[in-house]
């Protein structure tokens, strides 16, 4: 049994005939690899026929190198798509530079390839003589475990299963009742899984393809939580007909080349800045969106839109990203199966949909994918209660951290919504997840009701907050009569919450600590810092003030928030840091997507933060809340002037500590370089001035 599911019973009932077509395609792909790259060719295989980024025609397979074939041309043999090209150990970057695994760096490409090819040959020879342990000694191959394991499975299908992700292999090992070693290379875990499968009668006579298809069909480790992205199919949906007919979503930025060659957002941002310098440093968010597009997985959901209030269709990703240079434009492609029945006009514009890419709130997605009342009526059906609410990614991340660690600190610049996120997690934890996608007023009311619940407490730490407030202490007894001051032992906030949690062990209890870094945490927590660790919950300690026994129940959770501009995370006591998970809450340009006159608000916000990060640091960026009103982006020139003059500028002046030169570097022409005085202008002119100073060139807008 695994999670209440009898895996062996499911295997016994599995109809292997349902994967016959996929097996046949996999066999054809394997024959293609063997024909183009037979084992006997490997001793003399040239680098040009191996590496990505090099197109040298070959009589048997023009323009198709080994790595490209294994990643993009043999999906039925098992996928190794996604992520960067670093998984191929060495490849030629779009810039012409050779990128190599650490042990190869500094070598000439041909020399590096000779070393790498030798280790591939040693691996093939070791498997041929069934000396699997010696694979672990091949240090270069550890830098490309998925490619190496797929290679071994293709050339030696009797000795390996077509499963190549180390994480997925660990998942399947645990599923089938074994243990998973965290440091085990993919090929070793693959061998253990194969041995486990062969030891069970339920898998008797199964092929490796059948085993793989069964495991991914019913126990896919990727299917726990799928992301939902809004992606515009060209400006004003100009590419929609092509996307629908060809079952994909495509985007531009073709000059970047294959997105798989970029290993991180900084590298991709640099490429964006080179090709589109007019963005004035506003490329980091776009870089992250493009990498998220590249790394979409089968099962992820897509919303195709036209403008900010029209859904053209929803779709499900069916395969991984590919770069198609043969297309004249929009060469970045992800296969999608579309459902046009969800096409509709939304009741209200989605301001974050101005850009090509935007995350979609799961609650919103549920609203426009749920069957319409008229469609249900046509079928003689009615809506049967509420379906389960999918949680936003940030809320789910908090809950995952609480499950793993027991307590979490949300940290980031001021105004990024840390307290809002903490209360959102509290709503989800206490069964009120439906309020997360509600209108601002409804959500605010739900939060008020939440804090009346005896399972949730909110407290703000400050320098004078102490142990006696949090755990226990003697305080003035206001009910006492008689002369003089009478002290009485009083339970602190956390002591009281733990007492109530002990009486209801089947329900979660939550403490939200706002501004957690403003308190003296070692003094506030005292000896209880040890009891926060999940494996030490329920241990009894004797409280030094009262002598009473005390424990922290397992159903207690703690969320703290802190502004990194006030004090860095590194300044927290080391013992505290070890016991908390730390989740960053960053400024979100999508939250302020909109325009005010000529000003692209999101582009201004991103460019301003880029300057702040460059001349101060990332901890002193401004949060999107400074440019919101009632949860929506500011929309008028007067609101812009008020936010800029009364909130943003005073904050920056405080950060710059009176240094005029620093303020000028950040705000540029909006500041008098001699006096450091902000130039005064009417609100209607401010949008023009901010546009000229902070934005320009190409932007990520497709509405």
Image (tube, helix red, strand yellow):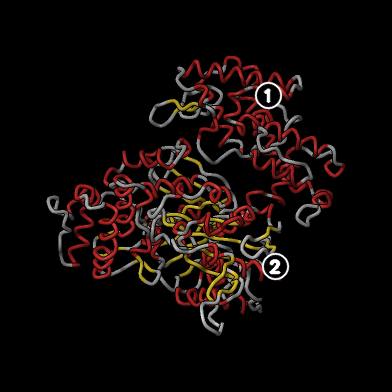
Q: Categorize mark 2 by other alpha carbons within 10 Å: few (<14), some (14-19), many (20+).
A: some
Q: Looking at this view, is 307 or 3 the one in front?
A: 3
Numbered mark located on residue 636 in the image: none
| Left or right: 80, with 190 as reference point | left
Q: Position of residue 564 (x, y in %)?
A: 41, 53
**Spot occupied by residue 331 in the image (x, y as percentages of width and height):** 43, 43
User: Considering the numbered disc 1 on the image, is that residue within a helix, a strand or a loop?
Assistant: helix
**Could you say which is closer to the camera, residue 492 or residue 653?**
492
SS at circle 2: helix
Q: Can residue 230 be seen in this view?
A: no
Residue 339 picture quarter: bottom right
Q: Please report whichever mark, 2 or 1, sits nearer to the chain's N-terminal start.
A: 1
Please tell me which residue lies in front, 72 or 127: 127
Closest to the observer, 69 or 439: 439
Q: In this view, does 694 lie above or below 515?
A: above
Residue 135 shows which numbered tag? 1
Outermost bottom residue: 481
The residue where tag 2 is placed is 502
Q: Is residue 568 above or below residue 87?
A: below
Mark toward the viewer: 2 or 1:
2
Q: Distance between the residues labelled 2 and 1?
A: 52 Å
- Percent from the top left, x then y, of residue 402? 60, 57
Q: Which residue of the protein is positioned furthest toward the right in this rendering?
A: 201
Query: Where does the image place residue 437, in percent across and percent down from the top left?
Result: 51, 69
């Amino acid at each position: 049994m695994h999670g209440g599911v009898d895996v062996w019973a499911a295997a016994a009932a599995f109809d292997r005939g349902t994967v016959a077509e996929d097996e046949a395609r996999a066999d054809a792909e394997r024959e293609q690899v063997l024909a183009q790259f037979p084992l006997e060719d490997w001793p003399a295989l040239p680098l040009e026929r191996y590496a990505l980024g090099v197109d040298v025609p070959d009589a048997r397979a023009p323009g198709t190198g080994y790595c490209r074939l294994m990643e993009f041309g043999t999906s039925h043999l098992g996928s190794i798509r996604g992520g960067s090209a670093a998984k191929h150990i060495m490849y030629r970057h779009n810039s012409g530079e050779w990128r190599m695994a650490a042990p190869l760096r500094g070598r000439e490409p041909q020399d590096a390839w000779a070393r790498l090819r030798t280790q591939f040959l040693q691996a093939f020879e070791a498997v041929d003589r069934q000396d699997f342990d010696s694979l672990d000694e091949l240090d270069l191959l550890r830098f490309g475990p998925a490619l190496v394991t797929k290679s071994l499975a293709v050339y030696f299908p009797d000795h390996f299963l077509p499963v190549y992700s180390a994480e997925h292999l660990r998942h399947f090992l645990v599923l089938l009742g074994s243990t998973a070693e965290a440091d085990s290379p993919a090929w070793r875990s693959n061998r253990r899984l194969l041995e486990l499968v062969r030891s069970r009668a339920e898998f008797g006579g199964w092929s490796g393809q059948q085993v793989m298809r069964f495991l991914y069909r019913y126990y896919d480790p990727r299917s726990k939580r799928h992301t939902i992205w809004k992606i515009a199919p060209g400006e004003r949906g100009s590419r929609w007909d092509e996307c629908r007919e060809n079952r994909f979503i495509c985007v531009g930025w073709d000059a970047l080349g294959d997105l798989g060659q970029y290993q991180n957002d900084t590298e991709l941002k640099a490429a964006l800045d080179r090709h589109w310098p007019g963005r004035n440093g506003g490329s980091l968010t776009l870089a992250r969106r493009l990498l998220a597009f590249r790394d979409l997985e089968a099962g992820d959901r897509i919303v195709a839109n036209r403008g900010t209030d029209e859904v053209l269709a929803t779709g499900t990703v069916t395969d991984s990203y590919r770069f198609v240079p043969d297309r004249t434009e929009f060469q970045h492609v992800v296969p999608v199966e579309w459902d046009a029945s969800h096409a509709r006009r939304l009741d209200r514009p989605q301001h974050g949909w101005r850009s090509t890419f935007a995350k979609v709130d799961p609650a919103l997605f549920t609203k426009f994918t749920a069957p319409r009342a008229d469609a249900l009526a046509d079928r003689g059906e009615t809506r049967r209660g509420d379906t389960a609410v999918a949680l936003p990614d940030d809320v789910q991340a908090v809950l995952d951290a609480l499950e793993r660690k027991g307590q979490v600190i949300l940290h980031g610049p001021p105004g990024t919504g840390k307290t809002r996120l903490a209360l959102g997690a509290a709503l989800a934890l206490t069964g009120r997840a439906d309020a997360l996608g509600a209108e601002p007023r409804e959500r605010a009311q739900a939060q008020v009701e939440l804090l009346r619940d005896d399972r949730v407490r909110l407290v703000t730490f400050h320098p004078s907050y102490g142990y006696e407030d949090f755990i226990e202490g003697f305080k003035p007894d206001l009910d006492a009569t008689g002369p003089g001051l009478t002290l009485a032992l009083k339970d602190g906030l956390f002591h009281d919450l733990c007492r109530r949690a002990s009486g209801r062990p089947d329900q979660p209890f939550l403490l939200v600590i706002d501004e957690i870094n403003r308190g003296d945490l070692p003094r506030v927590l005292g000896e209880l810092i040890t009891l926060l660790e999940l494996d030490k919950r329920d241990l009894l300690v004797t409280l030094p003030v009262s002598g009473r026994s005390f424990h922290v129940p397992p159903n207690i959770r703690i969320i703290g928030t802190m502004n990194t501009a006030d004090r860095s995370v590194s300044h927290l006591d080391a013992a505290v840091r070890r016991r908390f998970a730390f989740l960053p809450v960053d400024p979100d340009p999508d939250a302020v997507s909109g325009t005010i006159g000529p000003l692209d608000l999101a582009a201004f916000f991103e460019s301003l933060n880029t300057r702040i990060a460059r001349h101060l640091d990332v901890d002193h960026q401004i949060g999107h809340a400074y440019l919101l009103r009632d949860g929506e982006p500011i929309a008028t020139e007067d609101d812009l002037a008020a936010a800029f003059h009364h909130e943003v500028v005073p904050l920056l002046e405080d950060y710059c500590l009176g240094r005029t030169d620093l303020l000028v570097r950040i705000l540029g022409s909006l500041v008098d370089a001699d006096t450091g005085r902000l130039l005064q202008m009417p609100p209607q002119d401010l949008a023009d001035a901010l546009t000229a100073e902070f934005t320009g060139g190409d932007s990520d807008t497709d509405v």
